Image: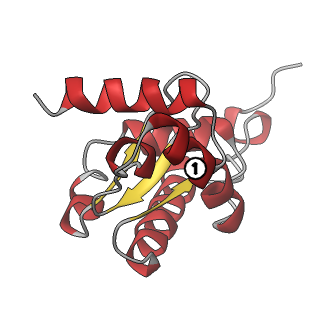
Amino acid sequence: MIVPWERASRKRGAELPVIRNAVAAALVAYAGRMRRNTAEPVAKVRAKIKATGDSTWKRVMADATLHAAPAALDARVESRVGARPSRLIRGVVIDPAATMPGTLTEVAAALGLSRGTVWRRRKGWRERSR
């Protein structure tokens, strides 16, 4: 039995660009509401803007046109580095362990970090600021 194509096929339920654009707009709006010089883990941001789909999120991050809007707000998404999760950053976020005056032991005690962590962060800060 031959069935006409119109009866055999069906329309897609949701248009992916519509979903992607909604998530991108929510991300830009969220970045606009953030205080300056703050950072939040992307996992928390995604939960707050209800961006649960991994594929949709990856399409949003790959969209070159999206990066201009947060840049106007001085916001950006910083990739994951080592054990630190990826973050949405607005403004300039400076690590206090790298810039706080004092000895390694004093800074570690004040921030609740180990001496080794303070040393690594200070070493990385000096290399990046050259």
Q: Residue at x 61, y 26 (%)?
A: 83
Q: Which one is in front, 81 or 70?
A: 81
Q: Residue 18, can we see it?
A: yes
Q: Label 1: how many residues lie within 10 Å, few (<14), some (14-19) or many (20+)? A: some
Q: Residue at x 68, y 46 (%)?
A: 12
Percent from the top left, x then y, of residue 110?
Answer: 58, 54
Task: State the SS at label 1.
Answer: helix
* Residue linked to disc 1: 42
Percent from the top left, x then y, of residue 79?
Answer: 44, 33
- The image shows residue 95, relative to residue 18, as above or below, that is above
- The image shows residue 66, relative to residue 54, as above or below, that is below
- The image shows residue 21, relative to residue 61, as above or below, that is below
Q: Residue at x 66, y 48 (%)?
A: 112
Percent from the top left, x then y, of residue 37?
Answer: 35, 67
Q: Is residue 89 left or right of residue 43?
A: left
User: Quadrant of the image for the N terminus?
Assistant: top right
- The image shows residue 40, relative to residue 86, as above or below, that is below
Q: Residue 15, can we see it?
A: no
Q: Is residue 125 left or right of residue 97?
A: left
Percent from the top left, x then y, of residue 45?
Answer: 61, 60
Toward the right, the furthest residue is 1
User: Quadrant of the image for the C terminus?
Assistant: top left
Q: Which one is in front, 108 or 38?
A: 108
Looking at the picture, the colour scheme in use is secondary structure
Three-letter amino acid code of the residue under disc 1 = Val
